[in-house]
Image: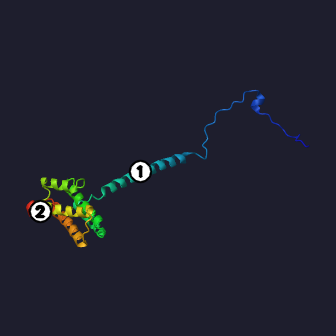
Amino acid sequence: MKTNVQALIVPDSAASAGTNDIRPITPPVDLPGSYAWLVWLAVLLIAGLVAAWFWKRRRARARALTVAPPLPPHEKARKRLAEALASIEDAKTFCILVSDALRLYLEERFAIHAPERTTEEFLQELPSTSCLNPEQQETLGEFLNQCDLVKFARHEPTQTELRRLHSIATRLVDETEPPPPRPEGIPASSVP
């Protein structure tokens, strides 16, 4: 085994002088891999989240403002009556749909509780209201009685009779539809 015998050991001058080995404090050194980029990344992330939140909130408000107003009762009734025509082949289903469309219309338009009552109860209460004139009340009574015959007494009407019931319901909706709103600035006497 070979050794390095010729190596020279140089003693430290302070240690060899017998003094304590205390050196002065060195100032902090900037490290090349600082964490400032993490702070900027966090700031950008928070700013992005806040911007996304404002954007979402603004879209929700805009969507809430653009929601279509509900259909008026007469338009709902016409839609239901048109949908009922699809089931004219089944008299009972057709009469149920047409009768319900008209009863719901009367409830929404005049606040009469038509759907929850029997035809007799409804027709007894109807004269005490001023929503329909006597002729319309009589027509409505005939219409509801004809529908009840089909729904409960197993009467089998022809398609002509069913179309007549449909036209009666449509006519009642047309006759009781509220007048269109009057444009602002136009006196009531000039509106037809």
Query: In the rendered structure, which amino acid carries the disc numbered 1?
Result: Trp
Q: Quadrant of the C terminus?
A: bottom left
Could you classify mark 2 by the number of other residues whose Cα lies within 10 Å: few (under 14), some (14-19), or many (20 or more)? few
Residue in front for this viewpoint, 74 or 103:
103
The x and y percentages for residue 83 are 29, 66
Rendering colour mode:
rainbow
For marks 1 and 2, give the CA distance: 60 Å
Query: In the rendered structure, which amino acid carries the disc numbered 2?
Result: Glu
Q: Quadrant of the N terminus?
A: top right
Residue in front for this viewpoint, 57 or 166:
166
The x and y percentages for residue 161 are 22, 70
Residue in front for this viewpoint, 162 or 35:
162
Q: Which residue is mark 2?
A: 135
Is residue 110 at all visible to an observer of this figure? no
Describe residue 134's horizontal placement relative to residue 84 as left or right.
left
Residue at 77% in and 28% down? 17
Can you tell which of label 1 and label 2 is closer to the viewer?
2
Question: Of the numbered discs in the image, which one, if any, rests on residue 26?
Answer: none
Residue at 26% in and 62% down? 151
Residue most toward the right?
1
Q: Which residue is mark 1?
A: 53
| Picture quadrant of residue 181 | bottom left
Badge 1 element: helix
Residue at 30% in and 68% down? 90
